[in-house]
Amino acid sequence: MRTETVVKKFLFSVFGIVAAGMAGSASAADVKPARPAPVYPAARAPVYVAPIHDWTGFYVGVFGGGGWGRHDYTNPASTQYGSSGGLFGGTAGYNWQAGRIVLGVEGDLAWANINGTGTPAAGLTNQSELQWLGSARGRVGWAMNNLLLYGTGGWAYGSVRNTNTNAGLADQFTVSKSGWTAGGGAEYAVNPNWSAKLEYRYTDLGNVSQPAPANLAAPYTVSNTFHSVTVGLNYKWGGPPVSRY
């Protein structure tokens, strides 16, 4: 009898534990997991790119600097001599920019005082003087925002005065000569309209010849080539630089 009572109590205990476990599982199944809080992307700030200078437009400017030349005198006596001096003038042109490439045309005219004297023989001297110089040229450049590196070349035109003195007697004449010029430089835009430049050019005005003058028994020829280094300031018509975002 006692044995049956113990068995019944044991069975009731087992059934109670099983029923409690099933009830807990059902309650847990009814509980839904909490949703995570939504994450919103941070607002994107606009990316700023520095202003890009536009070289397109008409411009005018002034320039000045120094020059030096070489002259070959042939009489039949011959000699070589140099010349040096300054020049100052004005310029005008137009640039057109496509990407980083800048194409342009430019003209200039300068007063000059570049002179030198050679002595082909005892008692004989010859003086050459460049009085003014002009040119009409093309330009091709590579733009790096405000900095423009360029090459230039074209037609040159100038006035050369030649004075030949022999035994105290002088023969002087002035001639305008056509030739060619080429060089290159760098230009920097300090703001949308103003820019400063540094330029080197080589100019060849060819030869000047004179039939036998009264003070000389034979004709003579003098060649005229020049180098120049100038600085300049240009003003360009155009709007503000373009800002990109």
Image (spheres, rainbow, N blue to C red):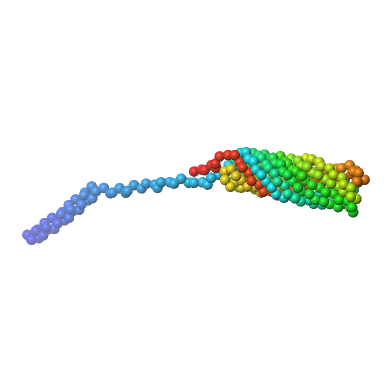
Front residue of 27/96: it is 96
Residue at the (20%, 53%) spot, across then down? 21
- Percent across and percent down for residue 63 are 67, 46
Q: Is residue 74 left or right of residue 235?
A: right
* Residue at the limit of the structure toward the right, as seen here: 217
* Residue at the limit of the structure toward the bottom, as seen here: 2
Residue at the (85%, 49%) spot, across then down? 126
Quarter of the image with the N terminus in it: bottom left
Q: Is residue 34 visible?
A: yes
Front residue of 165/92: it is 165
Residue at the (66%, 44%) spot, across then down? 62
Q: Number of marks in the image?
A: 0
Q: Is residue 180 visible?
A: no
Q: Is residue 84 left or right of residue 219?
A: left
- Percent across and percent down for residue 176 are 79, 40
Front residue of 174/103: it is 174
Residue at the (58%, 43%) spot, across then down? 193
- Percent across and percent down for residue 185 are 67, 47
* Residue at the limit of the structure toward the front, as seen here: 168
- Percent across and percent down for residue 164 are 86, 47
Front residue of 93/9: it is 93
* Residue at the limit of the structure toward the left, as seen here: 1
When asked about the image quadrant of residue 103, the answer is top right
